Image (cartoon, rainbow, N blue to C red):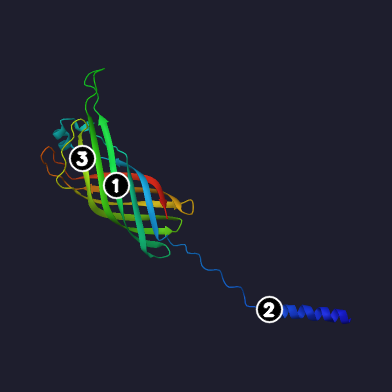
Amino acid sequence: MILVALLFGACLCSSTAAAAQDPAPPLPPIDDRIAPFVVDARITMPRFKSSATVAGSLGVPESDLPTRGLGLVVGGHFYPLRRRAVALGIGGEVLLRARGSRTIAPAIEDGPDGPTVVTRMTAVSPQVSLNFGRRNGYSYLTGGYGLGSFTTELEDSPVGDAETRPTIMNYGAGARWFTKKHLAFAIDLRFYKIGAQEAAVERPGYPASTTMVFSAGISTR
């Protein structure tokens, strides 16, 4: 009986001591907000609009102007204002030379190819974006305004250098999905409004135009 009493007393003291211990601290909340910054690199696929004015200045049919191209865009964005499901982004992007070409078909069967028409485009601009979602997946609306270049010419007879660069405004939307901790798949659809360019020595005039650019690539944070 004495042994049983001692064991009971030991268990009671252990239970009282355990109950007196402080509860385990709560786990810190998970920060599910969009990360503070992101860097992008995407392959671009611009859709150029044809122009009868440009075609006439080059002496080629409008249907022979290139309408599709390929290029690269890189950029970075910082998010100074982040809330649970929305973030304001500030940054910049550079559309490296996007290029499209089309070789005119022979005038007669088995004849030599005609000239090759080439369209090139670049753009540099600061960007502002409004982002919606969580850390590992979010969409955005974005816009920017800067300078760039846009030229359509014959490959064997390039036009002269522009005296000034046209203004280029862009706007569009996109999304990023982080499949790994620091790596995401990104898509973007953007419209670039290119200002008119006046004719200069050895260079035709180019009317204002809008180019649609779809791009896809990677983002890192």
Position of 2 compared to 138: left or right?
right
Amino acid type shown at disc 3? Thr
Kindly report which numbered mark, 2 or 3, lies closer to the viewer in this rendering.
Answer: 3
Q: Residue furthest toward the top?
A: 110
Residue 46 on image: x %, y %: 30, 41
Give the spatial CA distance, label 1 vs label 3. 14 Å
Occupied quadrant, residue 122: top left
Q: Earlier in the sequence, mark 1 or mark 2?
A: 2
Query: Residue 113, relative to residue 184: is it above or below?
Result: above
Position of 72 compared to 22: left or right?
left
Q: Which residue is mark 2?
A: 19
Q: Neighbour class for label 2 at 10 Å: few (<14), some, many (≥20)?
A: few
Position of 22 compared to 65: left or right?
right
Residue 85 on image: x %, y %: 42, 62
Give the spatial CA distance, label 1 vs label 2. 65 Å
Q: Which residue is mark 3?
A: 151
Q: Which residue is mark 1?
A: 95
Q: Neighbour class for label 1 at 10 Å: few (<14), some, many (≥20)?
A: some
